[in-house]
Structure formats: C-alpha cells, structure tokens
Image: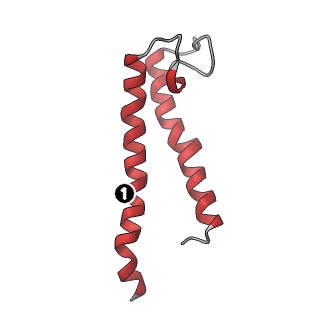
C-alpha cells in the first residue's frame, strides 16, 4: 500500500533523470554549433586544448553524448542511491 502512495514520487525522480539526459543531448550540439573550437565549451571539441583530431568532430560529439550518461549520470545515480539506502 505504501508503494502505491509513493508512485508519484518515484515517477518524478525518473522524469528528473530523463530531463537531465534531454538537456545534455540538446546543449552539447548547441555548444558544438555555436562556439569556436578555441573556447571548447563543455569539451565538445575534445578534452583540453587544442581540439582533438583522432576522430571527426561529429563522431566525437556523438560519443560525448553517449559518454556523459554512462560515465557521469549513471555512476552518480548509483552512488547516491547506495548512500541514501535506495530511498
């Protein structure tokens, strides 16, 4: 019974993760298209300066869009979930 009452809270937390992912998938291409490689905002042209050259810029952007959720969002989610005992 308590699980049924907590369903809206769980849905809100799930939606928060989806919104974070959507925000990253919108902002990274915007940064790529709107900034100079010299500024390298959000590392969309490579880690550090000068911009990376080992793959094409578009492929690097796609890899970065996949890497953020896999290397930042998911580990953070599981660490926080463990730290707060799955609440």
Q: Nearer the viewer, residue 75 or 12?
A: 12
Residue at the spot 37% in from the left edge and 18% down from the top edge: 33
- SS of the residue under disc 1: helix
Residue 62 position (above or below residue 84): above
Q: Position of residue 43 (x, y in %)?
A: 54, 24
Q: Position of residue 3 (x, y in %)?
A: 41, 82
Query: Residue at label 1?
Result: 15
Looking at this rendering, what residue extends furthest in the bottom direction? 1
| Quarter of the figure with the C terminus | bottom right
Is residue 58 toward the left or the right of residue 81 in the image?
left
| Quarter of the figure with the N terminus | bottom left
Q: How many marks?
A: 1
Is residue 18 toward the left or the right of residue 73 in the image?
left
Residue 73 position (above or below residue 51): below
Residue 1 position (above or below residue 36): below
Q: Position of residue 11 (x, y in %)?
A: 36, 66
Residue at the spot 52% in from the left edge and 27% down from the top edge: 42
Residue at the spot 39% in from the left edge and 31% down from the top edge: 27
Residue at the spot 46% in from the left edge and 11% down from the top edge: 36
């Amino acid at each position: 019974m308590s699980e049924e009452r907590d369903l809206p809270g769980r849905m809100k937390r799930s939606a928060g993760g989806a919104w974070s992912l959507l925000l990253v998938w919108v902002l990274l291409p915007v940064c790529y298209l709107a900034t100079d490689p010299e500024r390298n905002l959000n590392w969309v042209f490579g880690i550090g300066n000068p911009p990376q050259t080992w793959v094409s810029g578009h492929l690097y952007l796609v890899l970065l869009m996949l890497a953020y959720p896999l290397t930042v969002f998911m580990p953070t989610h599981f660490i926080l979930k463990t730290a707060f005992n799955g609440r």
